[in-house]
Image (tube, helix red, strand yellow):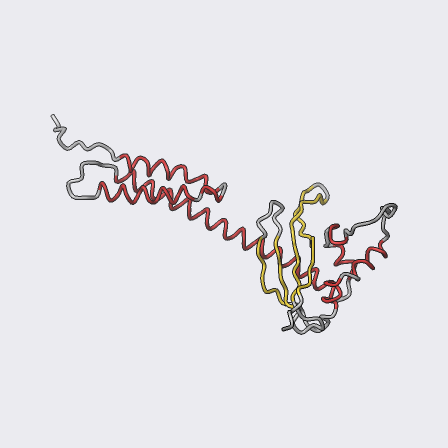
């Protein structure tokens, strides 16, 4: 008969580490769950320290290692996915801003207006002024915007993007800043760029539009 003196109960920490590692998959769904793989790693390390001591009264090294691997795997994948997604969104926001800026500075106002959201030209109107606008009227109002006039002076210089950050809003908007150094007005232009799903044929595609534009002039001491 085998002796039962070598029996060691499984460490609760090791079981908890394995459970946390399995639950770390939720980190792929939401960033709010990133704490789960972090907790799983902490539990696994604690479990390995407990069962790895000479003469340890509890077993569970394999469970702790499995939990550690799951926590690191799901946690690392979640972080990598978030970084890649952020890079892709930033690239799209900067590209959309660049298309708008180039269209304005090259005198292609209809194209610039085409990638602009309706809110860009939305202004308060009085009673009786709610009427459809013609294309020429919209283009005239667009060309009269101060930021548009500022970018239009950058004939020989392309504004350089200096920053692009997400606003953290539900609509996924980004703020893109571009320096007007070398242009007549100087200063910085700030564009609010946001994605919008539109129907193209039978498919739904993502289209980035310019929702707002502000001119941030340099302060003079």
| Image-quadrant location for residue 90 | bottom right
Residue 58, percent across and down?
21, 36
Question: Total of numbered circles in the picture?
Answer: 0
| Most distant residue in the right direction | 128
- In front of the other: 205 or 184: 184
- Quarter occupied by residue 217: bottom right
Q: Which residue is located at x 78 percent, y 52 percent?
A: 123
Residue 208 location, x and y as percent?
Answer: 67, 52
In the rendered view, tell whether residue 46 sits above or below residue 90.
above
Q: Is residue 81 left or right of residue 44?
A: right
From the viewer's perspective, tell me whether residue 30 is left or right of residue 216: left
Quarter of the image with the N terminus is top left
Question: 180 or 16: which is nearer to us?
Answer: 180
Residue 53 percent coordinates (x, y)? 19, 44
In which image quadrant can residue 151 be found? Answer: bottom right
Q: Where's the C terminus, which quadrant?
A: bottom right
Q: Is residue 18 left or right of residue 139?
A: left
Q: Nearer the viewer, residue 90 or 129?
A: 129
User: Most extreme residue toward the front, as rendered?
Assistant: 221
Q: Residue at x 65, y 69 (%)?
A: 218
* 73 and 182: which is toward the camera: 182
Residue 141, image x and y in percent?
81, 58
């Amino acid at each position: 008969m085998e002796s039962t003196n070598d029996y060691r109960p499984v460490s609760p920490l090791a079981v908890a580490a394995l459970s946390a590692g399995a639950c770390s998959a939720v980190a792929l769904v939401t960033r709010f769950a990133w704490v789960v793989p972090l907790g799983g790693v902490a539990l696994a390390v604690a479990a390995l320290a407990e069962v790895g001591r000479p003469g340890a009264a509890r077993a569970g090294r394999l469970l702790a290692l499995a939990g550690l691997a799951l926590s690191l795997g799901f946690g690392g994948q979640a972080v990598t996915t978030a970084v890649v997604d952020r890079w892709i969104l930033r690239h799209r926001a900067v590209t959309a801003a660049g298309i708008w800026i180039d269209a304005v500075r090259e005198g292609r106002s209809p194209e610039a207006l085409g990638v602009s959201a309706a809110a860009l030209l939305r202004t308060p109107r009085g009673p009786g002024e709610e009427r459809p606008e013609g294309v020429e009227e919209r283009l005239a109002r667009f060309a009269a915007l101060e930021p548009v006039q500022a970018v239009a002076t950058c004939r020989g210089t392309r504004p350089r993007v200096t920053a692009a950050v997400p606003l953290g809003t539900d609509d996924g908007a980004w703020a893109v800043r571009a320096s007007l150094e070398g242009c007549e007005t100087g200063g910085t232009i700030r564009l609010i760029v946001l994605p919008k799903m539109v129907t193209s044929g039978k498919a739904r595609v993502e289209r980035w539009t310019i929702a707002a534009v502000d001119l941030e002039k340099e302060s003079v001491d």
